[in-house]
């Protein structure tokens, strides 16, 4: 199958696949079509006996700068609840084989939420993480409040989500978000090496190990992600959300009204 917004390849010898987000003109913003393609690629990986692990990457400048704000700016609460857009992150969460995420440059908003669905994060020295949704009048809506709080603890998640501050690879490493940091010219190869190593292990044991480790952080996760999704959709009924997203598109500072 050919895709428009992602590039998929398979290393049959080393038994892993690579899915690369490819909308460089929008810093890999995750529009509906890109996410649909990504889910379709993962459905194929799930069935393919040659694929024992997956590397999920962007490009050097951006893993992904979040959900596509231009696509969301005019959406209503009802559309956000019914379109099935955010549910696509759930489908990737249900993927049973290990996902090594290779992050360079921007990894923001929905991009960080996608990276946190992965199982291991290899960062380049230039990686810039963050949940900046607050700056456009919303909150993380694809599991970020839940996954970041479970990964980094309540205080850290609260600070990062309430300020929208970007943070680098070193801070991500300290908080247990990134596993390893490499220079930009080698981070992707290192992610592939790790995927190949994992792919060489017994596939059923790897699969059940992933399932077991995920249990440690998953108490009520799905319910809590759905709760967050409803709050996210609710914000699409506010004037501040319209203003925040419009201001981003018009490249100006938003003016908040508190309603
Ligand atoms: N959605 C749509 N377009 C985006 C985008 C996004 N999330 N991020 C960047 N782009 C586009 C820009 O509009 C710009 O397009 P034009 O050339 O047509 O103007 C292009 O990508 C390059 O971006 P910038 O000119 O802004 O590049 P920069 O280097 O000056 O800034 C940046 C980079 C700091 C990442 C900035 O682009 C930015 O702040 N992006 C938005 C980040 C964000 O708020 N993400 C969260 C989105 S909401 C979300 O993800 C909800 C959820 O939880 C599911």
Image (cartoon, helix red, strand yellow):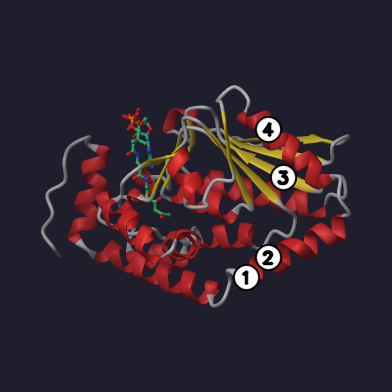
x, y percent for residue 33: 54, 45
Q: Which of 102 and 171 is in front in this view?
A: 171
Q: How crowded is mark 2: few (under 14 residues within 10 Å), some or many (20 or more)?
A: few
Residues tagged 2 and 3 counted as in contact (Cβ below 8 A)? no
Residues tagged 4 and 3 counted as in contact (Cβ below 8 A)? no
> Which of pointers 4 and 3 lies earlier in the amino acid sequence?
3
Residues tagged 1 and 3 counted as in contact (Cβ below 8 A)? no
> Which of pointers 2 and 3 lies earlier in the amino acid sequence?
3
Please give the residue where the numbered disc 4 appears in the rendered image: 190
Residue at 76 percent of width and 63 percent of height? 209
Q: Name the residue furthest top.
A: 185
The quarter holding residue 205 reads bottom right
Residues tagged 2 and 1 counted as in contact (Cβ below 8 A)? yes
Please give the residue where the numbered disc 3 appears in the rendered image: 54
Which quadrant is home to the C terminus? bottom left
Separation (CA) of disc 1 from disc 4: 27 Å
Separation (CA) of disc 2 from disc 4: 23 Å
């Amino acid at each position: 199958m050919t895709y428009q917004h992602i590039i998929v390849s398979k290393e049959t010898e080393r038994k892993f696949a690579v899915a690369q987000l490819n909308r460089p003109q929008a810093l890999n913003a995750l529009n509906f079509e890109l996410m649909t393609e990504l889910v379709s690629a993962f459905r194929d990986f799930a069935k393919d006996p040659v694929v024992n692990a997956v590397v999920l990457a962007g490009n050097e400048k951006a893993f992904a700068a979040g959900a596509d704000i231009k696509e969301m700016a005019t959406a209503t609460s009802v559309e956000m609840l019914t379109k099935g857009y955010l549910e696509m992150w759930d489908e990737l969460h249900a993927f049973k084989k290990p996902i090594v995420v290779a992050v360079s440059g921007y990894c923001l908003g929905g991009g960080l939420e996608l990276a946190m669905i992965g199982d291991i994060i290899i960062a380049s020295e230039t990686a810039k993480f963050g949940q900046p949704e607050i700056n456009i009048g919303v909150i993380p809506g694809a599991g970020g409040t839940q996954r970041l709080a479970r990964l980094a603890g309540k205080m850290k998640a609260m600070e990062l989500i309430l300020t929208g501050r970007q943070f680098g690879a070193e801070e991500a490493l300290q908080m247990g978000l990134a596993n390893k940091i490499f220079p930009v010219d080698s981070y992707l190869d290192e992610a592939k090496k790790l995927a190949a190593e994992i792919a060489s292990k017994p596939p059923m044991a790897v699969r059940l190990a992933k399932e077991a480790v995920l249990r440690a952080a998953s108490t009520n996760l799905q319910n809590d992600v759905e709760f967050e999704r409803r709050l996210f959709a609710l914000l699409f009924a506010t004037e501040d959300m319209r203003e925040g997203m419009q201001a981003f598109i018009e490249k100006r500072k938003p003016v908040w009204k508190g309603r």
